[in-house]
Image (cartoon, grey):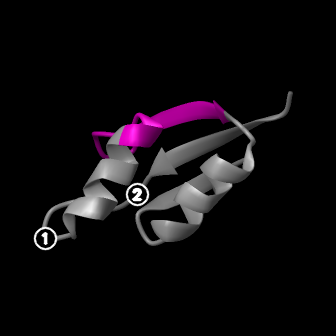
Amino acid sequence: MATVKIKQIGSPIRRPESQRKILIGLGLNKMHKVVERQDTPEVRGAIAKIQHLVQVVD
């Protein structure tokens, strides 16, 4: 299965609670942290909802 690397580039401070929960669900809780997740439609949808807080790393 393909994977995608996600890096947190934005702070969840002063963001809606739903966006904070998406970050935690992806395993991101600190700035510049990189996690690797399976490339599924659910993960891509979560990235799309918080695209201003994360970056897909090659």
Q: Is residue 10 magenta?
A: no
Can residue 54 be spotted in the picture?
A: yes
Q: Give the residue displayed 57% in from the left and 45% down from the top.
A: 6
Identify the image quadrant of residue 56: bottom right
Q: Amino acid at mark 1?
A: Arg
Disc on res. 23: none
Residue farthest to the right, as pictured: 1
CA neighbours of label 1 inside 10 A, class few (<14), some (14 to 19), many (20+): few
Q: Amino acid at mark 2?
A: Ile
Looking at marks 1 and 2 on the same chain, the residue that comes earlier in the sequence is marked by: 2
Q: Is residue 44 above or below residue 1?
A: below
Identify the image quadrant of residue 14: bottom left
Q: Could you tell me which secondary element the residue under label 1 belongs to?
A: loop
Kindly report the distance in space between the C-alpha atoms of the residues bearing marks 1 and 2. Answer: 15 Å
On the image, numbered disc 1 is attached to which residue? 14
On the image, numbered disc 2 is attached to which residue? 9
Q: Nearer the viewer, residue 40 or 51?
A: 40
Is mark 1 in CB contact (under 8 Å) with mark 2? no
Can residue 51 be spotted in the picture?
A: no
Q: Is residue 35 magenta?
A: yes
**Mark whose residue sits in front, 1 or 2:** 1
Q: Is residue 52 above or below residue 26?
A: below
- Write the start and end of the magenta stretch as one range: 25-37
Q: Give the residue displayed 29% in from the left and 62% down from the top.
A: 18
